Image (cartoon, helix red, strand yellow):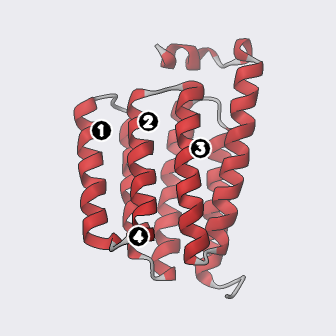
Amino acid sequence: MQWFSVAQIVGYVSFLLGAVAFLQRSDQRMKLWLVGQSATYAIHFLLLGNPAAAAISVVSGTRSYVATRSKSLLVAAAFIVLSFGVGFAFAGRGPGWLPVAASIAATVAMFTMSGVPLRLVMLGATSLWLANDVLSRSIGGTALESMIAATNLWTIIRMVREPQAMPSGLAAEAD
């Protein structure tokens, strides 16, 4: 494994974008940062030769953006069907389904949840991505998902401890 191959460097950029995303207390800002993180993740996995993870990253980035504009359950269902389609087209058996399952869980969360519950489900999705990355021998991906898990957990703790310190826009988003 090369620590500074082009694939791994793109993974490190994705790592930084993901960390910034989960530092956001605003659901909208978190989702927008995830668009960039997903785009770089797709490139990272293409370069590593993992087409299932690359394809589902494109679906995830698109979903994150659409989730900033819509809470439609019909749109969420379309992304779930799309994720299954990507799985059947690219995942094969076993571990290839880990990012697909992560995408489906995150889709449900992004379209139906906000605040702490959203981030808890995203933490579960992150765990699935982490397992995928370890199995794929992705240095950048493993670092990314570990950092996202830690950053997301820290933000959850802050949100639970300091609910009055939430940005005023976040309270309106939760309604």
Which residue was labeled with disc 2? 110
Looking at the image, is mark 3 or mark 4 nearer the viewer? 4
Q: Which of marks 1 and 3 is nearer the N terminus?
A: 1
Res 61 visible: no
Distance from the alpha carbon under mark 2 to that under mark 1: 8 Å
User: Which residue shows up at 65% across the image and 66% down it?
Assistant: 142
- Which residue bears the numbered disc 4? 94
Q: Earlier in the sequence, mark 1 or mark 4?
A: 1
Report, in whole angstroms, how far the alpha carbon at label 1 lies from the one at label 4. 24 Å
For label 1, the residue is 76
Q: In the rendered view, does 109 fall on the left or right side of 137?
A: left
Nearest to the observer: residue 116 or residue 64: 116
Q: Does dot 2 land on a helix, a strand or a loop? A: helix
For label 3, the residue is: 123
Q: Which of marks 1 and 4 is in front?
A: 4
- Where on the picture, by quarter, is residue 13? bottom right
* Amino acid tagged 2: Met
Q: Please name which of the two marks, 3 or 2, marks the residue nearer to the observer.
A: 3
Mark 3 → mark 4, Cα distance in angstroms: 21 Å
Q: Which of marks 2 and 4 is nearer the N terminus?
A: 4
